Image (cartoon, rainbow, N blue to C red):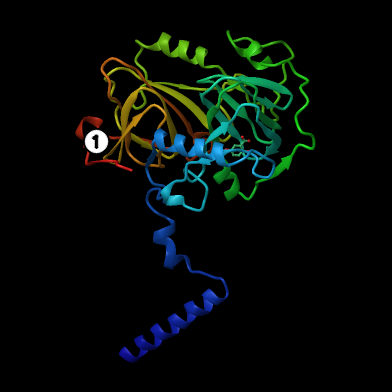
Amino acid sequence: MAFQNVDRAAELESFYTNMDAQNLEGLWRVAHDVLTPEPTTVVQPYLWRWENVARVTHEAGRLVPLERGGERRAVALVNPGLRGKFAATDTLYAAIQLIRPGELAPPHRHTPTAIRFIIQGEGATTTVESEKITMNEGDLILTPNWTWHEHRNEGTEDVLWLDGLDIPLIRSLSSIFFESFPEDSLPLTTATDYSTKAFGSAAVKPVGYKPAAKDGSMLMYRWPGVQRTLESLRNEVGTAHDGMALEYINPHTGGHTLPTMSCWMQMLRPDEHTQAHRHTPSVIYYAFKGNGSTIIDGLRFDWGAGDSFVVPPWRWHEHVNASASEDALLFSMNDGPVMEAFGLLREESYSENGGQQRVTGVFDG
Ligand code: GTQ
């Protein structure tokens, strides 16, 4: 009997070696790694301090010219769990982009979709397809999948913004296409800021309006309107897990910001401390105003204006405004629309300890 077992073990071993040589693998050997009871990810919760990111971005401004080939002066936030992947989460990429006075970031288009949240500086514009859009602090500007776009700084100061793209998702689908516009700049056949004129105030649109983007997305959202909405809702209940949270919607469909990404602005009112939850979408946050903390799986990430941080999929998290007098505003993007489209959107509330986590450590970079 023992002899037979040894025999069988030796036979199995050579069977597996043989399978491997033929690029074959048995599910029974890997099932526990593949079919996990819950999502697993190498993405780490992480925070990038504004001070460090800004220093590097300005150094790049001094050292790195803006030219075709490199395309953009964008400093990417690389998740330590995804080194070499040029990604902040499994699906999302974020970067700080700098454009200096007089510079043109050349026209191009690509299948990854981009969002830009303006951080600092006046006088820059983004042209999307044929419409030039002025960029001011707090505005959100979209360049949907395969739309031509270029950026210009026509002012006198450096302009910085947060780029968010679905590059990791589109790469994982091997669907990256990229094309340079054959001329130096895009022809402007639509009025400057036409989208703002058309969609800047009430829930109306010009009769016969056709979205410039092929996927029907909106092109821009102005900060003053978002700010007014937050202010109007200040004394309303809001959400349990995210404070007073707004999603930037596509006014043509009422749906998410973009087919692959949703953008949010959250207001945490003075002393507000949310309940913890976890969900399948991953989120990249940018602290726009104020100071606070986000507790991710017990680790407290303290943030101030300009800091960016990542909440990986399916990790417990809750937010705290550290101030008793000031609001804290968090801009964020998430891959929820993809999750929803494929029936993968799940969310769970934290039920222990009154719905809030015990802090077991503080993130120190
Ligand atoms: O501004 O078009 O951060 O194409 C990465 C790729 C920005 C852009 C990025 C891009 C852009």
Q: Residue at x 23, y 41 (%)?
A: 361
Q: Secondary structure at mark 1?
A: loop
Residue 270 vertical position relative to residue 179 in the rendered view, above or below: above
The image quadrant that residue 100 belongs to is top right
Instruction: Report the quarter where the N terminus lies.
Output: bottom left
Instruction: Report the quarter where the C terminus lies.
Output: top left
| Residue 347 x, y percent position in the rendering | 39, 35
Q: Going by the image, does 231 lie left or right of 166?
A: left
Q: Is residue 103 visible?
A: yes
Q: Going by the image, does 184 lie left or right of 110?
A: right
The image quadrant that residue 199 belongs to is top right
Residue 27 vertical position relative to residue 220 in the rendered view, above or below: below
**For this rendering, which residue is in front, 98 or 88?**
98
Q: Going by the image, does 287 lie left or right of 220?
A: left
| Residue 293 x, y percent position in the rendering | 31, 31
Q: Residue at x 40, y 11 (%)?
A: 233
Amino acid at dot 1: Gln
Location of ligand 1 given as a quarter of the image: top right
Residue denoted by label 1: 357
The image quadrant that residue 21 belongs to is bottom right
| Residue 298 x, y percent position in the rendering | 26, 40
The residue positioned farthest toward the bottom in the image shown: 3
Residue 82 vertical position relative to residue 62 in the rendered view, above or below: below
